Amino acid sequence: GAVVSQHPSWVICKSGTSVKIECRSLDFQATTMFWYRQFPKQSLMLMATSNEGSKATYEQGVEKDKFLINHASLTLSTLTVTSAHPEDSSFYICSARKAGEKLFFGSGTQLSVL
Amino acid sequence: GESVGLHLPTLSVQEGDNSIINCAYSNSASDYFIWYKQESGKGPQFIIDIRSNMDKRQGQRVTVLLNKTVKHLSLQIAATQPGDSAVYFCAETYPSGGSYIPTFGRGTSLIVHP
């Protein structure tokens, strides 16, 4: 099956620093990738849709200057949490769409901001 | 926005029993549906999908039923095993601005007792 690699799987950072999370589609080209955020025991909340070669589309309430998304190639999208604060601590998950609507997910990144 | 304060519904079953997990979706324009399994600390894993022109689809030990009239989706797991313990999410996708937006349901925690 298709593989989506997400890195890092776990990161701890100090408040005020920025953290970059990478999402790669390993065996297919993904024109669209999605970034989700998940709090404990809750569902996945779509943050933004990342389109290769164009600006990301952010969901209502998601600060685009806070969560910078770059989709520079057909196999790589990055999410940068800028000036992270403790309330940004969460589980972040990316997904990539292959051949239509089928979605495959990365393994997630647990971000802890101290 | 976020679902604040909501806890996942839980389904507890005995090993070997059949499990039925239900999901209500919201958008009548949704035409593609997916069930995912998520184990603790990991990204969602694709289980089975169904298009809106079908009302039933079977996989290995799993069956998805779709009732478009009442916007209801169910996942049936036959002969449930301890390894099936996880959180199960349904996702609906609907066309939006030339793309397809996947939106997740609340999720159900399945606990299988040996």
Image: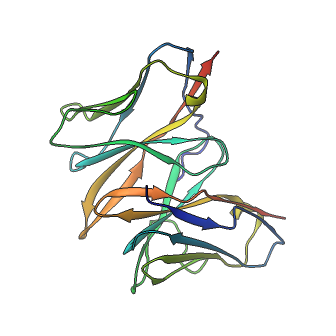
Count of labels shown?
0
Q: How is the image coloured?
A: rainbow
Between A94 and A45, the residue placed more toward the observer is A94
In this image, A80 relative to A19: left or right?
A: left
Residue B90: % across, % down: 41, 41
Residue B72: quadrant of the picture: top left
Residue A63 against residue B87 in the figure, above or below: below
At horizontal 79% and vertical 77% (from top left) the residue drawn is: A16
Between A75 and B41, the residue placed more toward the observer is A75
Residue A60: % across, % down: 45, 65
Residue B71: % across, % down: 26, 35
At horizontal 42% and vertical 83% (from top left) the residue drawn is: A55
Residue B77 against residue B14 in the figure, above or below: below
Residue B49: % across, % down: 32, 43
At horizontal 45% and vertical 57% (from top left) the residue drawn is: A104
Quadrant of the image containing the C terminus of chain B: top right
Residue B33 against residue B114 in the figure, above or below: below
